[in-house]
């Protein structure tokens, strides 16, 4: 099958890697891809979505998969579908579930999907007044896309008010903060759940936990994610069923009622409070680094799952997972997440140990290639993934693999999966 993948991160690399390991031979294309995806397929440089759709038509691309949120919110799916192309991802209208946090919160309220008490407004007086009614910590969110960084957990009323003021003025997140949500802080444990949807049916993948903070012990600033593991032992069948009944099914039914059936990945950020799942947020694509650990756990065909979802035939397939656990550790560049870093050559030691060779791999993200050498370009550079029969075994293998990757200023957390261990 000829497959086009939109995006340049570890998420897109890991989807492609999973497809390369299938029995069926696929020809892969990336827009734009990264310095390592060229080992898996052909990188393109076609930024205009209409031109990209024309390329897909001309080259008989049978399936397009959209990795990041920005093209989805921009309506790339609508453009491809108008040309009769098969593409996996939500329409521009359905992508508002991530594109606008205000839309998402109002949708949750309308369809009685459990979520935290909130107010959404562009009035500083209204927001301050609601803030005063809450007990700190207080959650402040910018409405639009902020690359996973538009949420502030304020430890005092003053800190919350400062965050509100900076968002509304455009200082923090530009236009993305022109409308603000203030909501109650929920005390529990957080999960990432992913449903592959075709508008009517869905398949719920294994629950993961990711680590947002930069430093060990969940200290330091929020990031796009410093590591993740799956499946998490913090979820039992009863909790999965509650998520199916109270969150996913009413969301799919609600989106149909809104005239925007949801197709693609519904990423549900869940806070479990006293055994009850409360929806923190929706995203309309795979989490990164969660995707890097979910893909290697799938034993059934990844390409078939995406294709059947994109052609509204999810009910035709069974998705199967291995009994193993996966742990992914992100390696970031020296100045992440504050500023860009100078490109640094990546040296990867040869793996001589069969156990490590067989049960670990690297998913590349922020890398470029020059003279056949890979360079860390800044941001999150790569993810070292370990598989094992226990979380501990998977984690130990992931960290052994980390020890074999070198570049100037590399930054990692040393406690990924600590919640489960």
Image: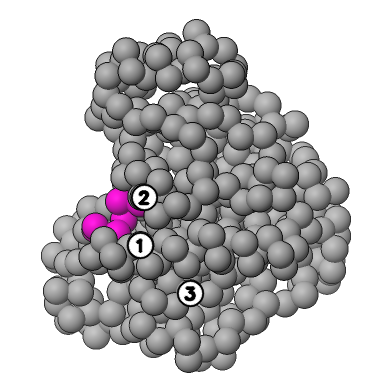
Query: Quick one: label 2, few (<14), some, or many (20+) residues within 10 Å?
Result: few
The residue wearing badge 2 is 110
**Closest to the observer: 416 or 52?**
416
Q: Secondary structure at mark 3?
A: strand
Which residue matches tag 1?
A: 254
Viewer-proximal residue, 405 or 97?
97
Residue 183 vs 191, above or below: the answer is: above
Q: Looking at the rendering, which quadrant does residue 349 occupy? A: bottom right
Give the residue at x 43% y 27%: 182
26, above or below 90, in the image: below
Query: The N terminus is located in which quarter?
Result: bottom left
First-in-chain label (1 vs 2): 2
Q: Is residue 41 left or right of residue 19?
A: left
The residue pinned by badge 3 equals: 202
Query: Which picture quadrant has residue 264?
Result: bottom left
Residue bounds of the magenta highlight: 89-98
- Report if residue 33 is visible in the image: no
Q: Earlier in the sequence, mark 3 or mark 1?
A: 3
Query: Marks 1 and 2, how far apart in space?
Result: 9 Å
Q: Position of residue 37 (x, y in %)?
A: 45, 64
Which is more foreground, mark 3 or mark 1? 1
**Is label 1 in contact with label 2 (beta carbons under 8 Å)?**
yes
Q: Is residue 296 left or right of residue 246?
A: right
């Amino acid at each position: 099958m000829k497959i086009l993948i939109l995006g340049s991160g570890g998420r897109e690399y890991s989807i492609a890697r999973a497809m390369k390991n299938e029995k069926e031979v696929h020809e892969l294309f990336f827009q734009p891809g990264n310095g390592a995806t060229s080992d898996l397929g052909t990188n393109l440089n076609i930024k205009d979505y209409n031109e990209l759709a024309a390329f897909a038509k001309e080259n008989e691309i049978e399936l397009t998969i959209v990795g990041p949120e920005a093209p989805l919110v921009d309506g790339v799916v609508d453009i491809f579908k108008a040309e009769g192309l098969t593409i996996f991802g939500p329409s521009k209208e359905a992508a508002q579930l991530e594109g606008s946090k205000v839309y998402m919160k109002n949708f949750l309220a309308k369809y009685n999907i459990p979520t935290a008490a909130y107010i959404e407004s562009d009035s500083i007086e209204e927001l301050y007044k609601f803030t005063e009614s809450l007990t700190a910590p207080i959650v402040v969110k910018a409405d639009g896309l902020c690359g996973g960084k538009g949420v502030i957990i304020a430890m005092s009323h003053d800190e919350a008010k400062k965050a509100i003021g900076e968002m509304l003025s455009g200082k923090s997140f530009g236009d993305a903060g022109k409308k603000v949500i203030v909501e109650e802080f929920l005390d529990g444990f957080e999960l990432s759940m992913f449903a592959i949807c075709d508008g009517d049916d869905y398949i719920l993948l294994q629950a993961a936990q990711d680590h947002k903070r930069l430093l060990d012990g969940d200290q330091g600033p929020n990031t796009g994610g410093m590591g993740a593991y799956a499946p998490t032992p913090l979820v039992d069948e009863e909790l999965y069923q509650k998520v199916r009944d109270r969150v996913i099914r009413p969301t799919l039914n609600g989106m149909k009622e809104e005239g925007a059936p949801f197709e693609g990945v519904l990423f549900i950020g869940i806070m479990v409070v006293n055994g009850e799942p409360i929806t923190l947020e929706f995203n309309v694509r795979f989490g990164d680094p969660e995707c890097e650990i979910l893909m290697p756990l799938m034993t059934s065909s990844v390409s078939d799952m995406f294709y059947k979802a994109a052609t509204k035939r999810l009910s035709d397939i069974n998705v199967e997972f291995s009994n193993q656990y996966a742990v992914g550790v992100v390696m970031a560049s020296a100045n992440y997440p504050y500023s860009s870093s100078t490109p640094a050559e990546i040296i990867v030691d040869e793996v001589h140990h069969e156990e490590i060779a067989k049960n670990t791999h690297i998913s590349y993200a922020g890398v470029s290639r020059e003279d056949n050498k890979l360079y860390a370009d800044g941001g999150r550079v790569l993810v070292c993934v370990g598989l094992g029969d226990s979380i501990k075994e998977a984690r130990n293998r992931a960290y052994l693999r980390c020890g074999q990757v070198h570049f100037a200023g590399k930054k990692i957390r040393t406690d990924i999966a600590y919640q489960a261990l």
